Image (cartoon, rainbow, N blue to C red):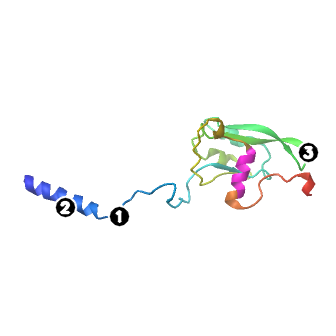
Amino acid sequence: MGRLGFLKSMYLTFKQFFRKPVTVLYPEERIPDFSRYRGIHLLNMQKCKGCNLCGMACPNFAIKMVERLNPKTGKMSKYPEINMARCMFCGLCEDACPLDCLKLGGIYDFATDSFEELIFPPEKLAELWEQRFGTPALLESKSNE
C-alpha cells in the first residue's frame, strides 16, 4: 500500500515537471485582458455635466467633485476626482452615470510610491479615456475654435 502511494506521487511529480510553466514574467509578458475586467476609471470631460450621480453612488466616498474651467463656456464646471486608494472598483459609479461619460477601463497597472499619485484628477482620467478610445475627452480651448 505504501509503495503504490509513492509511485502515484512520483508519477504526478514527473508529469508536472514536463509541462509548460503557468507563470508569466509580468513586466515583459502580459496575459490578455479580460473583456469585463474593471480597472482604472476613464472620463470623457466633453460629455460630463457635473451631476455628481457617480459620487453619490460610490459606497466608499472615493469620488469628489472638483471645479475646473470649462473653456467652451468660460465658466467653472464640476468634474469627478477619484481616489483610487479608496475605490473598490465595484462599477456603481459607471452604472449611475446617465451620459456614459465615466467608464471603468481595463488598465490595472497603476502602482506608485506615494499616496498622492493615487488621487486621479479629471484631466488624468480624460487622458486615459483618449488612450483607450482614441476620441478627444479633454475640453478644447477657445483658441482652437
Residue type, mark 3 in image: Gly
At mark 3, the secondary structure is loop
Which residues fall within the magenta stretch? 122-130
Where residue 37 sits in the image (x, y, percent)? 55, 54
Which is more foreground, mark 1 or mark 3? 1
At mark 1, the secondary structure is loop
Q: Main secondary structure of the magenta part?
A: helix
Given contact means CB atoms under 8 Å apart, are the residues at marks 1 and 3 in contact? Answer: no
Q: Which residue is mark 3?
A: 74
Residue type, mark 1 in image: Lys
Q: Is residue 27 left or right of residue 127?
A: left
- Residue depicted at 61% across the width and 47% down the height: 91
Residue type, mark 2 in image: Tyr
Q: Is residue 73 left or right of residue 29?
A: right
Determine the CA span between mark 1 and mark 3: 60 Å
* Residue 123, numbered label: none
Instruction: Report the quarter where the C terminus lies.
Output: bottom right
Q: Which residue is mark 2?
A: 11
Where residue 50 sits in the image (x, y, percent)? 78, 43
